[in-house]
Image: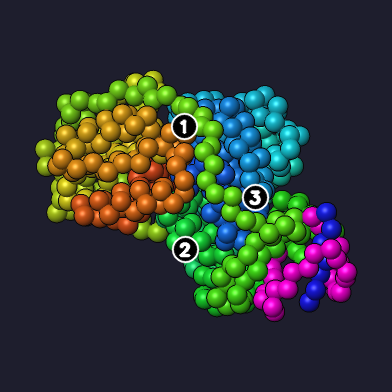
Amino acid sequence: MDFAVKDGYVVGLGEYEAEREYDLAGACVVPGLIDAHVHIESSLLAPAEYARLVLRHGTTTVIADPHEIANVRGAPGIEYMLAESMRTPLDILVMLPSCVPATPLDAGGAVLAATDLARFRGREGVIGLAEVMNVPGVLAGDQDLRAKMDLFEVIDGHAPFLSGKDLNAYIYAGVQSDHECTTLAEAREKLLRGMYVMIREGSTEHNLRDLLPLVNACTAPRCCFATDDRHADMLAGKGHIDDCVRIAVASGLEVELALRMATLSAAERFGLHDRGALAPGRLADFCVVDDLDRFRVLRTFKRGIEVIDPGYRPPACLAAPLHARVPEPREILLSGRGEARVIGIVPGQITTRDLRFPVDAAGIPDIGRDILKAVVTDRYRASGSGVGLVHGFGLQEGALAGSVSHDSHNIVAVGVTDADIVRAVGEVVRLGGGLAVVSNSDVTALPLDCAGLMSALPHDEVVRRLAALEEHARRLGAIANPFMYLSFLALTVIPEVRVTERGVFDVRAFADVPLFSE
C-alpha cells in the first residue's frame, strides 16, 4: 500500500503525487518502534551515540528516565540529558526521576525535591513522572513524594512483588504502570487492577518469555515493551525493541500483537497521539523490515526522512568528580562466624535471594561454595566502605569494580582477595569513573568520563572494550554480563538483600542489618 508524507506527517494512504518517491519493492513497512521505559545511561553511551545504535534498529522514540545521572548530579544531570537529546533525530522523551535518592537511607550525589522537579514541568520533551520506587513512601503518604506526583498526570511505577491491598493503595495514589513484573501471576494481578504492564527484556532482566502469556487481543493495548537496562554490546549484537518483537513472535505471539506492543500501545500509554501508527495526521516515523517473521530492520525513517548515520560526534560530558577514598585491605576485613546473610544472584533477573550460609569470616573467599566478598565504597563523601557476601558470581581469581551501581552509583566491587578488590576500586578511582577487571598484573578497563556512568567513546569502541572486559572476567570464571549484575548489588529498592556503603541492607525490612543473623 502506498502512503504520502508532508512536513513530517502522514497525509494519507493510497496513491498520491509527490516531489520525491521511494519504491520499497514490496518490503514491509511498520510504524517506528517505541521503548516504553529505558535508562539511556545503562547503555554506557552518551545519548547521541545511544541514538545512533537504536535508530538503525527501527526505534524512533524512547521514554527515558534520567534517574541514574540525576542520582549523581541532580538537576544539572537532567539538564544535560535534555540538551544532549537535541543532538539526535531520535525522540528522547523524558519522565522526571521521582526518587533521588532512591530511598531516604541512600546518600548519593543529589537530592531532588518536588520544587526541583517543578521547574521542568512544561519543558519540551518532559512528559511525566518516572518510576515511583519509594513504595513505602507512597503507602505512608510521604508529603514530598505526594507533591511530586501531583505535578504530573502521567506517572510510572516500580513495585516488584507488590500485591493485594498495598497494590490497591499504590494504584489509588496515582501510579499507572509497572515494569518490574517477573512472574505471570504478578503481571496479571497488576493488569486486572488497571495498570499498564511494561514487559522488560534487558541485559540481565529477562522477563519477556515468562510474561508473554499475559498478552492477547484484549490485553495488548495495556502491554508494551521496555528494555530498562541494556548495555551497548547487547544493543549492537541483538538489537533493541526489534529484538523484543523477534523474541515474542518466535515464542508464539501473533506478529500483529507484538507490533502493537512495540508501537501503538506504548504511544497510547503516554498519550502520544501523534505517533504509533501509519495513519493520517500521525508522525511519519516508520521502518522498513525484510519480513515480519525475521523482523530485520533495513531502513529507518524519522518524520518522513530516511535516517542516515551521521557518524561519531564527540559528546559534551558532564563531569562528576569522585571523592572516594580507596579502602585499605584492613578496612574491608570481616570478622565473626555463624549464619550469614549472603546475596544470591538470580540468573536472568535483577532480584536477589536472601541466602543463609554457615560462614567463618576467616574462610572467605569460599571458592568451593562460590561465596565472595562484595564491597561498596562511597564515591561522594569518602565516608568509607560497606562489606557483604555474594553467591553466584563464579570468580575463581581477581576482582571486578565499577562506578555504575544503581541507584546511588557508589563504587561497587566483587573479588577473590582483599588486595584484588582494593586494586580494582583504585583503578576505577584512577579513571575518574569506569569499569575494571584486575588479575595478577593484568588490568582491563573502560573509562566512563560522563558522570562515571557513560563513555564519550564511539559506540563501536565501547562495544569492543566491553567485549574485552567480558572476556577477561570470563577467564577468571565470572558469570555472563558480570558488570550488569555487579551494578545491581547495591540497588535498595529490589528484593531481597543488597550491600551499600553502610553494609548489608534487607529490602523487605527496609533496614540495614548485620551480616551475621542474630
Residue 114 belongs to magenta span = no
Total numbered circles: 3
Q: Quadrant where the C terminus lies?
A: top left
Alpha-carbon span between mark 3 and mark 1: 22 Å
- Magenta stretch in the rendered image: 8-34
Q: Nearer the viewer, mark 3 or mark 1?
A: 3
Whether residue 61 is visible here, answered yes or no, is yes
Taking depth in this image into account, of 226 and 61 the one nearest to the observer is 61
Q: Give the residue number, with chain letter if any, for mark 1.
A: 451
> What color scheme is it?
rainbow
Farthest residue to the left: give it. 362
Regarding mark 2 in the picture, which secondary structure is present there?
loop
Q: Give the residue number, with chain letter if any, for mark 2.
A: 238
Residue displayed at 56% across by 70% down: 296
Taking depth in this image into account, of 49 and 193 the one nearest to the observer is 49
Q: Position of residue 359 (x, y in %)?
A: 17, 44
